[in-house]
Image: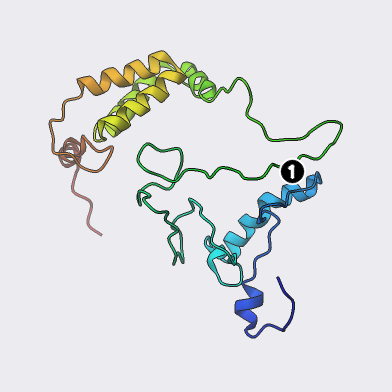
Amino acid sequence: MVLNKNPENYFAEVEQVAFGTGVLVDGLDFSADKLLQGRTFSYSDTQRYRVGPNYLQLPINAPKKHIATNQRDGQMEYHVDQGKGQNPHVNYEPSILGGLKEANQDGKDHRPFVEGEVKREAIDRPNNFGQAGETYRRFNDWEREELIKNLVNTLATCQKDIQDQMIENFTKADPDYGKRVADGLKAFKQEEPSGPIGSTGAAQAVNEAINKSTPSDPY
């Protein structure tokens, strides 16, 4: 930022400017100040509410160099950041359907010495599915049946590689979880024309609503 002139348009260059400690360039990092770290989360949310979800696309707030992110959509979206060869329907990673992949880091993370090193590092024993498995095992039988039914109805309209990936995730959480979803998909028979995802029984629901409905009282 170069402070070499006064604003020409007060609203565009002052009212819409959105400062936030969470918007950093490579090479800068946060200090150990707890108040600063708390504000790092809240400031950006404040700007999204005050200015709009895409406030970083406004000229006064936009970076001078191109950056690649997975951020997409929202009010006042006027630029879609899409990479070369990227699946336009995928804005998350990791994905088996051609989404963006995080770039390799060229530099090293800042690691201040505070009675030892403070650094970002993957743990030796990751437990990415433990909490999901514990939650599944805490469910009552009827809750598990409802969960499996909803998942099967939703996944039944997906292509097989997506179904296989989801079954693998469920199995890692709990073997019974994955097995019941897999068995449910094998047993699934599509008797009605398919509707939107998750609405495989839409026609039956409509007929049931018609049969159970009653005329409303006149005004």
Residue picked out by circle 1: 110
Residue at 38% over, 49% down: 86
- The answer to which quarter of the image holds residue 174 is top left
Residue lying farthest front?
106
Q: Amino acid at mark 1?
A: His
| Residue 143 in view (yes/no) | no
Q: Is residue 82 above or below residue 185?
A: below
Relative depth, front residue between 58 and 111: 111
Relative depth, front residue between 28 and 17: 28
Q: Is residue 88 above or below residue 109?
A: below
Q: Is residue 102 above or below residue 18?
A: above
Residue at 44% over, 64% down: 79
Q: Is residue 117 left or right of residue 121?
A: right
- The answer to which quarter of the image holds residue 105 is top right
Q: Is residue 3 left or right of residue 195?
A: right
Determine the secondary structure under disc 1. loop
Residue at 39% over, 20% down: 144
Locate residue 138, reporting x and y percent: 49, 17
| Residue 168 in view (yes/no) | yes
Locate residue 192, reporting x and y percent: 13, 35
**Label 1 crowd (10 A; few <14 / some 14-19 / many >=20):** some
Residue lying farthest right?
115
Q: Quadrant of the C terminus?
A: bottom left
